[in-house]
Image: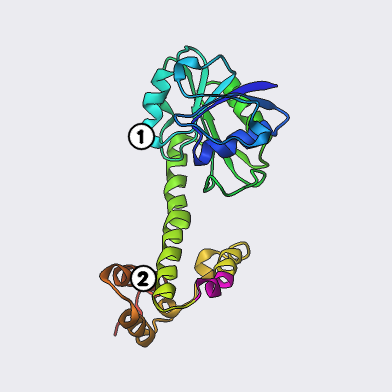
Amino acid sequence: MITVTIIGYGNVGSHLVKAINDSAYAKISQVFSRSTVSLKKTIDDIDFINDLSDLTEADCYIIAVPDDHIAAVSEKIPFTDRFVVHTSGSVAMDVLDAKNRQGVFYPLQTFSKDKEISFTEIPICIEATQADDLDLLKKLGQSISEKVTEISSLERSKIHVAAVFVNNFVNHLYHVSEAIMTENNLDFSLLKPLIIETASKIEFLSAKDAQTGPAKRNDEQTIERHLSQLKGDTQKDIYTLLTKAIKNTYTKPNEGKL
C-alpha cells in the first residue's frame, strides 16, 4: 500500500481524499488545506495541516489547487526527488518544480464539493516523466476508476477545451434557460426530462445526428419569434451565435444558390 498526500481540499481534492481513502491500494497520509475544514467521520483520522512545511514524506503528492497556484505550491514542497503530480486539465506537467519527479493525475469530471460522486466511471488521465511513476499512477487510478488512460500534456489540453464546451458552456446555457423560465413565472423542472433525454441520446447517436430544432430546420419564423421573446442583448447574442453555428453545420454548401 502506498501513501498519498493531497495538497488542496477544494472541489477536486475533497473528492480525491474520499475516493483514495476508500481504495485498497493507497492510504491518505496528509491533507493540506489553507483553511479549517469540517471533517466527515470517515476521514477524521487523517492528518490535516495548513502549513506546507509540516509535510511528511509520502510516495505521491497530489496538488489539487487552482491552476494558477500549481507552480508556486510545487516550489514550496520541502523535499527533493519525490513524486509530485497535479490534477489540472489545462496545465502542462512541466510547470511542476523540477526538483521533484513530475506527473499528472487528471480526473475528467466536474466536481462540486457537496455533491457526492462515484469515481468508478470517471476517466483518469495520467502522465509521468518516469516509467515507475507512471506505473504507480496507473495502479492508483485503477484502484478508484475503471477508466485510466495515459495522455500527454498536449492531448490533455485539447481534451480540456472540449470539456469546457460540453460542461461549462452547457451548464451556463442551463442557467440562461432557468432565468428565462423564472422571468416568466415558469417552473424550470419542466425542462429537466428534456435535459436528461438530450444527454442520454449521445450514448446511441453522434451529437451531429442527434441535433434537432429550428436552426437545423432553418425555421426563420420560429427563430425570429424566439428572438423577440428574449430579454437583454446577452441572451439574444447567445441565441444568434448558436443558431448561426447550427445553420452552418447543417446547410449544404450549394443550398440557396442559383
| x then y, percent, for residue 81 | 50, 12
| x then y, percent, for residue 11 | 51, 42
Q: Nearer the viewer, residue 112 or 204?
A: 112
Amino acid type for the residue under numbered disc 1: Asp
Tell me if 99 is positioned left or right of 113 in this view: left
The residue at the far bottom in this view is: 221
Residue under pointer 1: 68
Q: Residue at x 60, y 33 (%)?
A: 17
Mark 1, secondary structure of its residue: helix
Q: Residues within 10 Å of mark 2 (few under 14, many from 20)?
A: few
Image quadrant holding the C terminus, namely: bottom left
| Secondary structure mainly formed by the magenta segment | helix
Q: Which mark is residue 172?
A: none
Amino acid type for the residue under numbered disc 2: Asn
Q: Which mark is residue 248?
A: 2
Q: What whole-number distance in Å separates the C-alpha atoms at marks 2 and 1? A: 36 Å
Image quadrant holding the N terminus, namely: top right
Q: Residue at x 50, y 23 (%)?
A: 84
Residue 103 visible here:
no
Residue 206 visible here:
yes
Q: Nearer the viewer, residue 205 or 91?
A: 91
Magenta-span inclusion, residue 106 = no
